[in-house]
Amino acid sequence: MTVRLSKRYGFAASHRLHSSALTDEENRETYGKCNNPYGHGHNYEVELIVRGTIDPVTGRVVDLVRLDDLAEREFLSPFRHRNLNEEVPAFRMTVPTTENLALEVDRRLREAWPESFPKDGPCLEMVRIRETDRNICEISAKAETDVLRAKQEPGT
Amino acid sequence: MVISKRVEFSASHICRSAKLSDAENERVYGPAANPLGHGHNYVVDVAVEGEPDPVTGMILDLKRLREILEDKVLNVYDHRLLNREVEPFETVVPTVENIAVDIWNRVAPHIASHIGGRARLYSVKVYETSELSVEYRGEG
């Protein structure tokens, strides 16, 4: 039986939304208060949705201890109480919007996934990040493939 | 079009498999393997897919859905020790995955018969805590 399991994690971090490709005025217009040069922070929530079949012995779709370990290693420990712009290399050149944060969490998890779970085991179906209750971004496995394809085939 | 109804129940359970050693049970389930059990306030979202009836404007009679959920789920699960008092959990580990599948199996036939084939059960989503939930859509 195929089920989807959702596990929610939280971390607090600071960031500043500012693009070096825009002028100061354009940055202020685009990002508003989030462009404050001193930065600001959020209590981020990350929801991982895992799809797979229920193991008949354990009754589990995914080994939750391994999932928790993976989350801790790949994004909770690196992001918790950090200044994302300054302390996470991926955001030195990329603006740490909720969208880019979702892409980064998704990328890290997909790279590390095969070390934690068997090939025919559970798969990561979606990553959903809540920056606030009113600002939520989600990325599904298919959408991620589309983004990578767009990056590989610019202009197509 | 999908409409969903939420119900809640409280129950205790023990997550241990007779096919695993004590050490394996404790690794897989952590504190949930406590042989004396523990409990949760479960939240269940039951979603039904269909088209609104042209006369009533409703996919199904929500009062009737509530009765089905009371009768087939809450009366069975609420304030019970799942391992001892709810089939099939004497032999199947009452993980939130298996609870979602069992609730589906209890509810699905009644939705189909009540609606006369115009709507079907779309998904059962069970929250064990606000951090952990499982959704089952009847897929094999």
Image: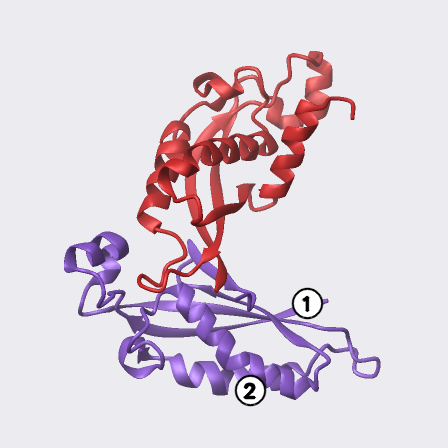
Chain colours: A red, B purple
- The label number, if any, that marks residue B67 in the structure image: 2
The quadrant where residue B61 appears: bottom right
Where residue B2 is drawn, which disc sits there?
1
- Label 2: which secondary element: helix
* Tag 2: amino acid: Glu
How far across and how far down the image is residue A49, in percent? 50, 50
Quarter of image, res A79: top left
- Of all chains, the one bearing label 2 is B
Residue B69 horizontal/vertical position (percent): 52, 81
User: Counting other residues with Cα less than 10 Å from the Cα at mark 2, is it few (<14), some (14-19), or many (20 or more)?
Assistant: few
| Residue B120 spot, x, y in % from top left | 65, 76
Chain bearing mark 1: B
Q: Nearer the viewer, residue B122 or B47?
A: B122
Vertical placement of residue A110 versus A22, above or below: below
Q: Residue B5, relative to residue B68: is it above or below?
A: above
Which residue is the extreme one toward the left? Answer: B22
Residue B99 seen in this snapshot:
yes
**Closer mark to the observer between disc 1 and disc 2:** 1
Q: Identify residue type, mark 1.
A: Val
Q: What is the spatial separation of the Cα atoms under label 1 and label 2, in whole angstroms? A: 19 Å
